[in-house]
Image (cartoon, rainbow, N blue to C red):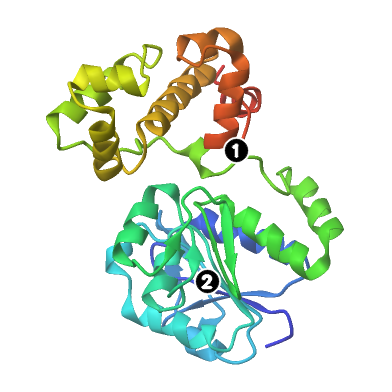
Amino acid sequence: MRAGDVVVAVADGSPVLDIAGPVQVLHWAGRRVLLASVDGKPVQTDFGAPLGVAGALADFTDAVDTLLVPGYAFTDTLSPDLVQGVRDIAGAARRVASICTGAFVLAEAGLLEGRRATTHWHACDELAQRFPSIRVEPDAIFVRDGPIYTSAGVTAGIDLALALVEEDEGPEVARQLAKYLVVFLRRPGGQSQFSVRADAETARNPLLRKVIDAVVTDPADDHTLAAMAARAALSERHLTRLFRREVGTTPGQYVERVRVEAAQQLLESGTGGVAAIARRCGFGSEETMRRAFLKVLGTTPTDYRARFRTH
């Protein structure tokens, strides 16, 4: 091993982009990158392409600078040997980083105990439920907690790798690499802007479901706390308790999120001006929608449309 060497722990089912994105960044930054599997044999990627390796994980337990762990589709059937191999190397590595659901490998290895972490937005709830000691940050593109780094899904591995380069080589080198890759050095917004999930699970209480259905059906209607409480024939206090217990948020925050998601769909479809969309989704004004987008998504409606509009 040489100073600055990067080892990528791969196994059958590794997504190519989880590996190729950060590996390309680190290679162009002058790092030697070595792929390693549990037994030192080639592995197959998630679509069946063979991937050669430099050796077995056990061959790289000394003097590793950075250990990278890509994600896997089936996080409930991770190889115990892969988890153990990552655990062994992590003890000698200067830093450990995961891409996408590779966070589950780190979690199974005990490396995220009591730490902050993130993963693909689709798997954040599962990570939090299976490993309650981890403080999951679902909107982060990547998270650093001490020597442990975790990133969001797929292309977020490039963001993470650029951050590692910036840490080692300085911002100018990272900036030049980002330009060459035609990507943001720091992309605006968080994972929420890429999420198509509903934040609220199906409410068990029928009166609460009635309120939620009304909000989703017509986001622009009167959804003040007083109006929603009257609709459900509940006190405002009781309705707020139901939202917190069954949805995990306040009534106002839920309404705001639904309106933002409705606006996202209209911005993506390319129909109507921003001011008209704001009124149609219940924000009242363009400025109110702008503030809501910044709070919920970390970006503005105009920037969101520029990135996601379909033609």
Residue 209 sits above or below residue 106 on the image: above
Q: Are marks 2 and 1 in contact (CB under 8 Å)?
A: no
Q: Which residue is labeled 2 in the image? A: 52
Question: What x and y, as percent, mark residue 78?
Answer: 32, 70
Image quadrant of residue 131?
A: bottom left
Residue displayed at 47% across by 9% down: 280
Quarter that holds the N terminus: bottom right
Mark 1, other Cα within 10 Å: few <14 / some 14–19 / many ≥20: some
In three-dimensional space, the C-alpha distance between marks 2 and 1, rounded to whole angstroms, equals 40 Å
Q: Is residue 138 left or right of residue 198?
A: right
Residue displayed at 73% across by 42% down: 182
Q: Exactly how many numbered labels are in the figure?
A: 2
Q: Is residue 213 left or right of residue 178?
A: left
Q: Is residue 295 left or right of residue 138?
A: right
Answer whether residue 201 is visible to the viewer in this image: no
Q: Secondary structure at mark 2?
A: loop
Foreground disc of the pair 2, 1? 1
Of 30 and 300, the residue lying toward us: 300
N-terminal-most mark, 2 or 1: 2
Question: What x and y, as percent, mark residue 242?
Answer: 23, 38
Of 50 and 136, the residue lying toward us: 136
The amino acid on which the numbered mark 2 sits, given as a three-letter code, is Gly
The amino acid on which the numbered mark 1 sits, given as a three-letter code, is Gly
Question: What x and y, as percent, mark residue 178?
Answer: 76, 50
Residue 255 sits above or below residue 3 on the image: above
Answer whether residue 172 is visible to the viewer in this image: yes
Of 17 and 209, the residue lying toward us: 209
Of 6 and 275, the residue lying toward us: 275
Q: Which residue is labeled 1 in the image? A: 298
Quarter that holds the C terminus: top right
